[in-house]
């Protein structure tokens, strides 16, 4: 498939809005999920670190 | 846990042993996903020819069909692990089912969105209430319902059980989606690729679509493994090994 020019490539034979609208939203959905996963992992580790720190403090005061 | 000499699949059914395995495998699946999607996109835009009937608008197929396949396949996998968790009471199975749902919902949304953008230029409408489109929309609601139900129940075991029942009942929707274009007269076209007959599309188009599907598949595995690791940490926080794991991280 030879598009000739970038202009033709982006125009997608007049269907640019539909084709790029599909690919752009798919890309956004994938990136959003990846960002959500990274944020979730950071959040979990941060929350649990606080949780264990609090638990340790409680044990120390009890003792 | 002590490892015995013989390899056992049950070894990895414990969250403690699966957690590092998932962490070790995840980058490989992520890497494969990137490579396959790059090759798939190249074929989709630079190798596959223009469609005689639809012009360039058909190029939406390279994400639409793989996303739709993944949306159905991931639901079946989610239903399977839900069922295993329900019957065998294995904690990890339920965690995997929980981890699959958001990725499945994401691909269902992508299938619906790209379908709307493909429907407009080819059918003249973004949406019709035909059997294929409606049953795929129900699939999205099933995923959302599964996640909402699990999130709404505080007791984790009860949340897993309730979610599993919902997931298993919802499995009936998958053959309905798949065969909807055969059973009812729909605006949506029939399958271009089926298990019983030769594909009715150009070889390079088919190749691009299959490679994109493989890429989405690898992505789904990578995302699910990453998510199941978060779920394991959250649910197993009372165990010594998670405390040690977090201690090493912080």
Image (tube, rainbow, N blue to C red):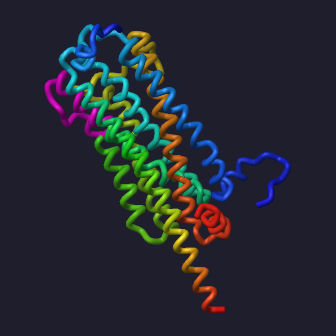
Q: Position of residue B188 (x, y in %)?
A: 26, 26
Magenta stretch, overall SS: helix
Q: Quadrant of the C terminus of chain A?
A: bottom right
- The reply to whether the magenta stretch includes residue B127 is yes
Quick one: B2 or B246, which is closer to the camera? B246
Name the image quarter holding residue B42. top left
Q: Position of residue B5 (x, y in %)?
A: 85, 49
Q: Residue furthest left?
A: B124
At x 48%, y 58%, the residue is: A42
Q: Is residue B32 above or below residue B9?
A: above
Q: Is residue B206 above or below residue B145?
A: above
Q: Is residue A36 above or below residue B129?
A: below
Q: Quadrant of the N terminus of chain A?
A: top left
Q: Position of residue B196 (x, y in %)?
A: 47, 19
Total count of labels: 0
Quick one: B85 or B37, which is closer to the camera? B37
Q: Residue furthest right?
A: B5
- The reply to whether the magenta stretch includes residue B38 is no
Name the image quarter holding residue B178. top left
Quick one: B89 or B229, which is closer to the camera? B229
State the extent of the magenta-drawn residues as a range: B111-136
């Amino acid at each position: 498939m030879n598009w000739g020019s970038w202009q033709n490539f982006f125009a997608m034979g007049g269907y640019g809005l539909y084709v790029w609208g599909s690919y752009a939203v798919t890309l956004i959905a994938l990136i959003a999920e990846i960002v959500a996963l990274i944020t979730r992992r950071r959040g979990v580790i941060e929350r649990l670190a606080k949780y264990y720190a609090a638990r340790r403090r409680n044990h120390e005061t009890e003792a | 846990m002590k490892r015995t000499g013989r390899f056992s699949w049950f070894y990895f059914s414990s969250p403690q042993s699966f957690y590092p395995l998932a962490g070790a495998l995840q980058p490989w699946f992520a890497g494969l996903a990137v490579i396959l999607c790059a090759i798939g996109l190249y074929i989709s835009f630079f190798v596959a020819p223009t469609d005689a009937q639809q012009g360039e608008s058909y190029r939406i197929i390279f994400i639409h069909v793989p996303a739709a396949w993944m949306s159905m396949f991931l639901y079946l996998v989610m239903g399977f692990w839900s069922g295993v968790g329900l019957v065998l009471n294995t904690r990890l199975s339920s965690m995997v089912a929980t981890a699959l749902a958001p990725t499945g919902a994401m691909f269902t949304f992508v299938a619906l969105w790209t379908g709307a953008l493909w429907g407009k230029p080819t059918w003249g409408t973004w949406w019709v209430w035909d059997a294929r489109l409606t049953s795929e929309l129900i699939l999205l609601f099933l995923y959302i319902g599964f996640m909402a139900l699990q999130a709404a129940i505080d007791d984790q075991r009860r949340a897993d059980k309730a979610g599993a029942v919902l997931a298993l009942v919802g499995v009936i929707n998958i053959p309905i989606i798949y065969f909807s274009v055969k059973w009812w007269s729909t605006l949506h076209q029939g399958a271009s690729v089926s298990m019983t007959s030769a594909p009715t599309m150009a070889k390079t188009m088919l190749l691009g679509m299959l490679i994109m599907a493989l890429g989405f598949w690898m992505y789904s595995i990578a995302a699910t493994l990453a998510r199941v690791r978060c779920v394991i940490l959250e649910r197993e926080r009372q165990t010594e090994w998670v405390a040690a794991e977090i201690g090493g991280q912080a």
